[in-house]
Image: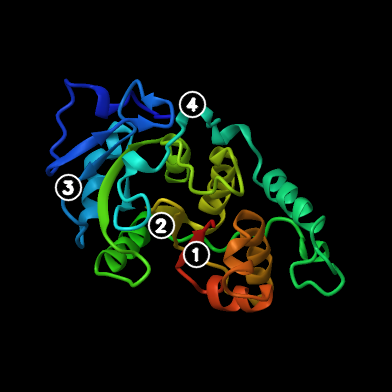
Amino acid sequence: MASLPNALANPSTTLRLPPGRLVDATTGGPWHEPLLWCADAPAVVGDWASLRATGRDLGLLPVFLDVGTRQSTPDRWGLDPAGTSYPGDHDAFEVLDGHWSDFALYQEDPDEADASPDAWRGLAPATAPCADPDGDAADTADFLAEGVPWLKELRPALVPARRSADIPAAIGWSGPLNHENDVARLCAVLRSWEDRFGARVVVLTFDQLVLSVASPPTAPEHAEAVAAEHYAFCPDNIDQGIAPLGRYAEEAVRNSHVWSFWWD
């Protein structure tokens, strides 16, 4: 999954990192190399940008891990890299279309349901690209490090991955397990959002994913199309959160530089 040899596993590589530890715990026992490095101290403003600069040339990408929620530390998250495929082997449209079709089977009244099959129009168009999506991600990370009610205790971390969208697959993250058993399929969608909207993976918890979005949709019709993608990606956002889909598009997608997802 790493674009370069895993710098976390190479003793000859000198990384100037604050105190922290390597994590290799998986559902099948210790992994053959470290899956990530996690700092001991809470995240503060500037950490995300600093870690990006430190790890960029070594194939290491920054992410914040919330260790103050369920299952606390990533050692207890049930990471499963052995059961995870490669994001590049999947197509974002096919993944979302497949989940949408599955949901359609369970609609009691698809003629009245806001998230009916008729609402699926395929992938939304890309927005005008942001000049610096990583800078936007750093700003988002700084905002979250200052404290928000729905994130408890963030720790800076580094993950060996090709691109930000691949971070969940690189560690075998099992947060969406009740919805999708192979997180690499969802990472294919994250790659598409990375390309179309400048998205970056900024925070992972036991069962939550938080993205920075440099170029979110601004037109209502585009936001509604992206909201449908969100529903196929994470139905709990709407079914157990903001509904109906049109309201979700306006409140959680349109002009929003932070997209968060939670799987029950």
Disc 4 crowd rating (10 Å Cα; few below 14, some 14-19, many 20+) is few
Q: Which residue is mark 4?
A: 82
Disc 2 crowd rating (10 Å Cα; few below 14, some 14-19, many 20+) is some
Q: Amino acid at mark 1?
A: Ser
Q: Amino acid at mark 4?
A: Ala
Tag shown at residue 133: 2
Q: Earlier in the sequence, mark 2 or mark 3?
A: 3
Tag shown at residue 215: 1
Name the one closer to the observer, 43 or 6.
Answer: 43
Q: Quadrant of residue 16?
A: top left
Q: Earlier in the sequence, mark 4 or mark 3?
A: 3
Q: Are marks 1 and 2 in contact (CB under 8 Å)?
A: yes
Is label 3 in a helix, a strand or a loop? loop
As drawn, 175 above or below 21: below
Q: Which residue is mark 3?
A: 40
Q: Earlier in the sequence, mark 4 or mark 1?
A: 4
Is label 2 in a helix, a strand or a loop? helix
Name the one closer to the observer, 3 or 173.
Answer: 173
Looking at the image, how many numbered discs can be counted on the residues?
Answer: 4
